[in-house]
Amino acid sequence: MKHRALALWIALLVVGALAVSFITPAPLAAEEPQVYKVGFISHLTGDAAVYGQSLKMGTELAVDVINEAGGINGVPVEVIYEDDRLSAADAQTAFLKLVETDKVPVILGSASSTISLSLCPKAQEKKVVQVSQVSTAPALKDCGPYFFSVMASDTAQGPEWVKVAEYLGVKEAAVMYINNDYGIGVKDTFVQAFEAAGGKLLIVQPFELGGKDFRTEVLKVKGTNPPVVFIVDHVAEASIVFKQAAELGLKTQWVTDVSIVSPEVPQLAGKEAVEGIMGLRAGSSQTPEYQAFREAFLKKFGKEPTIWADFAYDAMMLVAKAIEKGGYTADGIQKALFEVAETYVGPSGAKKFDEYGISQGSYEWVVVKDGEWVLYEKAPSATETPSATETAQ
Amino acid sequence: MEIFVQLLINGVIAGGTYALAAVGYSMVYGALKFINFAHGSIAMVGAYIAFVLVTMADVPLVPAFLGSMLLTAGLGVMVERVAYRPLRRAPKLASLTTAIAVSFVLDAAVMIIMGADIRTFSLTGMRSYQIGPIYITPVQGAIILTSLVFMVGLYGLLTRTKLGKAIRAVADGISLAEVSGIDTNLIISAVFAIGSALAAASGALIGMDTNLQPTMGFIITVKAFAAVVLGGLGNVWGAVVGAFLIGIVENTGVWFIPPVWKDSIAYGILILALFLRPSGIFGKKEEAQVTVL
Amino acid sequence: MELALVVHLLVVITIYGILAISLNLVVGATGLFNLGHAAFYGIGAYTSALLVKAGVPWLLAVLASMAMAGFVAFIIGIPTLRLVGDYLAVVTMGLGEITRAVFKNWISLTRGPMGLPGIPHASILGIEFDTADKYLILGIICLLITFVVAERILYSPFGRVLKGIREDEAAVQALGKNTYRYKMAVLVVGSAMAGLAGSLFAHYITFIDPSSFVMWLTFFIFLIIVLGGLGNNLGAVVVTVVFVALREGLRFVGLPLWLNPAALQQLIFGILLIIATIFVPRGLIPERKVVYE
């Protein structure tokens, strides 16, 4: 009995191996490709799908613009979208499919820093360029030469919040943060910077990704009577927090991180709940590049640009320019990216990379007025954030 | 002190939504000895139907709510017919498998049709009212009221109507019920219809109170399941008590413990209770003999 | 070459195959409705990862992680093995979730939601398994060992008692067997195997975080063993191959973007499962009946 089972199993393996050798296609002749393929990995389904889908839209817009202008040196570009289902293991599979089957030299992704971190070593190993649109964990800078991020590191948000606190003239504050790598990262940099500047933290309250009921957490914060609450969160949970905070009568000045500055939040939370909330917005919405992007986005999708679509747009544009300059190879793209980014200014701002491949960034202050995020007119003039290397822990 | 009262109210509100879902779960279990893991997904569909009626068909809130319950009841009956009935004589794990597969199908279908974005009902005039030290919104009040009304209604149904009697007969023993001339297939469909309608109510209310996402079904399934077992399998009123208990303990517990443990609190209570009373709070001793296969 | 992707999938198949066999022992053969199985997978993964990162040789770390998983199973078994059927289900589900909360919250040890990156590759006596090809060999060896051990258990007198417990525990007890001891033994062994799978997983992907060990994974393995035939390990492995191939293979079917390919995969997967379960409720490859002279 036992031997028969073993034999069957070995037979299966042999058959499988034979099948594999038959379906492996003959190596392609080295000819000019008819289309430049670029990979894309992000969360297209599941809890954080709103971010992945948004990045996808920004990328699609960029592809349209590129191909309408004739493509890269006359060759159209095509993006292959893969879902990482917010899981490191699935991201690996997606990565391998893109690299081995589609043979892309460059991959855009992921959104989540955790996933980007898990993909990075494989990208270095396989020598594939990885350009993340919005991953900002400080650890990413040490990942390797093939990794790039077009958004400034998290380490910059904390000090920016301290500036807001100084502007508001508060010495005490509460912090609410979402319990994932992103939330913890921003919370830590803020706590450090705020206490170093002499501030006092009334309460540091975490809450869970995917939760629907934050009333108790809100009540705890309310109990400390904070003049200001700094909150780092994602769209889904933030809208619930604001809604429930308003319901429970928590009156305070909210200041948010970059990932909540999105039109969905006032929509989902209800106008009254979010009136007057301040936040940080990565990049700048006042530039002509952004305005042009916004109009194109409206035209194509019929709505205001969704969160970080501008970063996705810029990532794709940079990759296209790098292919144009350096050729359709990983090493060529890797070198060219530094060069093209030096002078590139897109809807999400100037994208010059530091030596680790992380973009510089600046923040503008925004506030919700009448259900929309608008520029905060009274902010002190926008400042360049220090590079990731300077504020690295 | 007043904060504690608010926490209690919050717990009751949460418990109300769990209770609506748990009751349907419990009824199905009672009739078929079958754990319907797709229950939460059905609740989610109910939520979305109500959402579509309100935001796209401009149906006023209450008719939309009732309409969703009706339509979801139909969905429940259909699911039972197509996916569960053929497996009634198969090993229990097969039905469990199908139930999970059904939840996959429902979740994915909604995601494709409605998109993965979060939606809200955007109800106007949603301010909260302050009654003494307590804050409560109209929707939350509606949740408590609706759960009570439906509980009372269900009680009446089960104890005073022929249908109710037939349902209880089937719950006591399906073969015996058949022998006494009850059309068990019809009764089972009725049970699924009622259970799904209540699930839809639960989903719609949760959606109105917070928001809607295609993935919201799973948590509803889990909480309802825990409530049902806590209260004693097959005991509908036990499920209600279990649901409120879980809601209250969750909301008060998070005051003292980091929120990452929130679900664990519910489970912890459940496990402790089962350890002390193995058949649930109200379960009959014989119920504990039920095996899976 | 496409080969690398296929190799990667084969490695994943060996890991899931071990998980399936381990669950088959506990659920398939013995009928213990363990919904928290993913927790042991996680315990194995974290234990192994942390030990190897601290400098312990991989072989020792694997054995330690299996022991750890088995030990935790033992602790959990003490109160829960007295429960039956659906109660056991929800308690194990709860314990699974609590374990995951521990992974998430014990930040000083597990780095919580940020996960453990940079896990060293597996290595035995200086041979480092750093490429997928080498890892496949390791995976196949582990799978074969697990398979042989499981089969020996199942087709032994011990195994016959287990299946007896699945069919009718009271009868087995009447025969004088201490069923509790048998159940505990199989739970510990099955969990240790899951721990092995966890260790393999950790050193292959070289990054783990709590999201890899969610309940959905347990459901996935449940589906595999049900379709493969409860207690049938060969069936389990075959179905694992089919499932993984299907799940990832659907990536290659070029579907229009607006249809949300990822959700569509889930939809098709679910529908296929429902059809398969209805037409082959006892599993694709029914268990071999043991014939006595």
Image (cartoon, coloured by chain):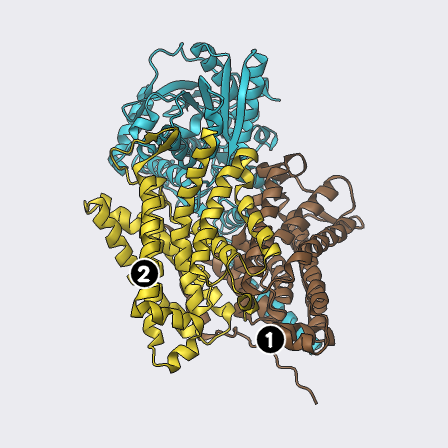
Coordinates of residue B25 in the picture (x, y in percent): 42, 59
- Relative to A201, is B152 above or below? below
- Chain coloured cyan: which letter? A
> Cα distance, mark 1 to mark 2?
39 Å
Q: Quadrant of residue C103?
A: top right
Q: Which residue is mark 1?
A: C167
Coordinates of residue A344 in the picture (x, y in percent): 41, 23
Residue at screen point 57% across, 15% down:
A195
- Tell me what hue chain B is rendered in: yellow
Judged left or right of residue B23, residue A360 is right
Badge 2 marks a residue whose secondary structure is helix
Q: Look at the image and tell me whether residue B210 can be seen.
A: yes
Between C33 and B56, which is closer to the camera in this rendering?
C33
Coordinates of residue A321 in the picture (x, y in percent): 42, 31
Question: Considering the image in quadrants, where does the N terminus of chain A appear?
Answer: bottom right
In the rendered image, the residue lying farthest to the front is B160
Between B234 and A256, which is closer to the camera in this rendering?
B234
Residue at screen point 78% across, 44% down:
C56
Q: Which mark is residue B156?
A: 2
